[in-house]
Image (spheres, helix red, strand yellow):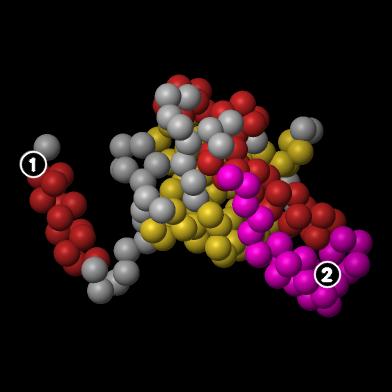
């Protein structure tokens, strides 16, 4: 199932209108291009995961890429995550909100995004992309489940209890 998130319109309007006001036009044009490229990479990453297209999915990661899962013990190198993912039918996370920032030299970007999933509801993806000779690549992706503050005491108590029993 292919997704066309609505945030492209927002980011394109923001980048084309506000960035030139903040920085010179040459840098603004580069930032707008990079913002579009980063958004396209992240969207393609989610589409490839939903389609279980592991070849495309892992081409979007840098060679030294790392995936951090929602469990504290889930820190996978690209090779380890490929072995895990290749046994699955994929997963579907639909981005709703995304924020992207760039380092001053333009060589890397970091992001956070709110995702929706039929399996887990709201989750959060964060990570880092690096600019390589082959274009932008995901160097780190972390998936978390944001816990509403009102639920935090009972959730963290459950985690502590679980961890003490191991």
Residue 59 drawn at (x, y percent): 65, 30
Span highlighted in magenta in the image? 1-29
Under circle 2, the secondary element is helix
Q: Which residue is mark 2?
A: 16
Q: Nearer the viewer, residue 82 or 2?
A: 2
Instruction: Give the overall secondary structure of the magenta segment.
Output: helix
State the CA–CA distance, disc 1 to disc 2: 54 Å
Under circle 1, the secondary element is loop
Q: Residues within 10 Å of mark 1 (few under 14, many from 20)?
A: few
Tell me if residue 160 is in the magenta stretch.
Answer: no
Picture quarter with the N terminus: top right
- What residue is shown at x 78% (from left), y 71% (from top)? 13
- What residue is shown at x 31% (from left), y 43% (from top)? 72
Picture quarter with the C terminus: top left
In the image, is 48 to the left or to the right of 119? right
Is residue 130 visible from the viewing direction of this image?
A: no
Tell me if residue 16 is in the magenta stretch.
Answer: yes
Residue 49 drawn at (x, y percent): 54, 38
Q: Which residue is mark 1?
A: 165
Is residue 77 visible from the viewing direction of this image?
A: yes
Q: Earlier in the sequence, mark 1 or mark 2?
A: 2
């Amino acid at each position: 199932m292919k997704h066309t998130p609505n945030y492209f319109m927002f980011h394109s309007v923001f980048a084309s209108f506000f960035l030139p006001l903040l920085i010179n036009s040459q840098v603004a044009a580069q930032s707008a291009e990079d913002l579009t490229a980063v958004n396209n990479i992240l969207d393609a990453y989610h589409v490839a995961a939903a389609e279980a297209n592991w070849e495309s999915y892992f081409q979007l990661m840098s060679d030294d890429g790392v995936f951090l899962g929602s469990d504290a013990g889930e820190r996978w190198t690209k090779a380890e995550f490929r072995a895990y993912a290749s046994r699955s039918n994929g997963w579907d996370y639909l981005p709703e909100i995304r924020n992207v920032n760039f380092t001053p030299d333009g060589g890397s970007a970091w992001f956070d995004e709110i995702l929706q999933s039929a399996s887990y509801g709201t989750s959060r993806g964060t990570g880092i992309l690096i600019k390589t000779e082959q274009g932008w690549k995901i160097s780190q992706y972390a998936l978390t489940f944001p816990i509403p503050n009102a639920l935090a005491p009972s959730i963290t108590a459950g985690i502590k209890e679980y961890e003490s029993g191991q």
